[in-house]
Amino acid sequence: LHIEFEYDKQKYHMKDIIIGKVYFLLVRIKIKHMELNIIRREQAGSGTGGQQYNESETLTKFELMDGAPVRGECIPIRLFMSSLDLTPTYKAINNKFSVKYYLNLVLVDQEDRRYFKQQEVTLWRKDIG
């Protein structure tokens, strides 16, 4: 399996639309379906002495494709984020707190094996003035 997952940008405002494409360059496994997940990872604490708290939460699962793709196929992606409960990305605030978001592309084959491709994205609050 060889795929390319591309989307229009790396930084989105919280009510934005994720637009992208998945290209299937080589397909030698029987894919059952493909989905796109948005994952929020929160990290709190200093990390010294086991005082670090980590939590991951899947905010949405969006099915992109049902059935087996063929070589050369291109699947479009359009995911509206306005209905999701999102916060801005925070990175290492006082080295004690961070919130990060990831786009997680998941392919499931006929034997229910899961293949992942994950990319971090930055979310920001759009000033509505």
Image: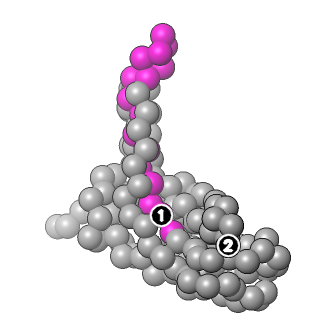
**What amino acid type should be assigned to the residue bearing mark 1?**
Asn
- Callout 2: helix, strand or loop? loop
Q: Residue 20: image x %, image y %?
A: 55, 78
Residue 35 in the figure: left or right of residue 42: right
Residue 73 horizontal side relative to residue 105, left or right: right
Q: Position of residue 17 (x, y in %)?
A: 40, 76
User: Is residue 89 positioned above or below 48 on the image?
Assistant: below
* Label 1: element kind: strand
* Residue 76 makes an appearance in the image: yes
Q: Which residues are magenta?
A: 36-52
Q: Which residue is mark 2?
A: 110
Above or below, 59 relative to 54: below
- Position of the C terminus by quadrant: bottom left
Q: Which residue is mark 1?
A: 37
Which circle, 2 or 1, is nearer the viewer? 2
Residue at figure coordinates x 20%, y 67% from the top left: 128
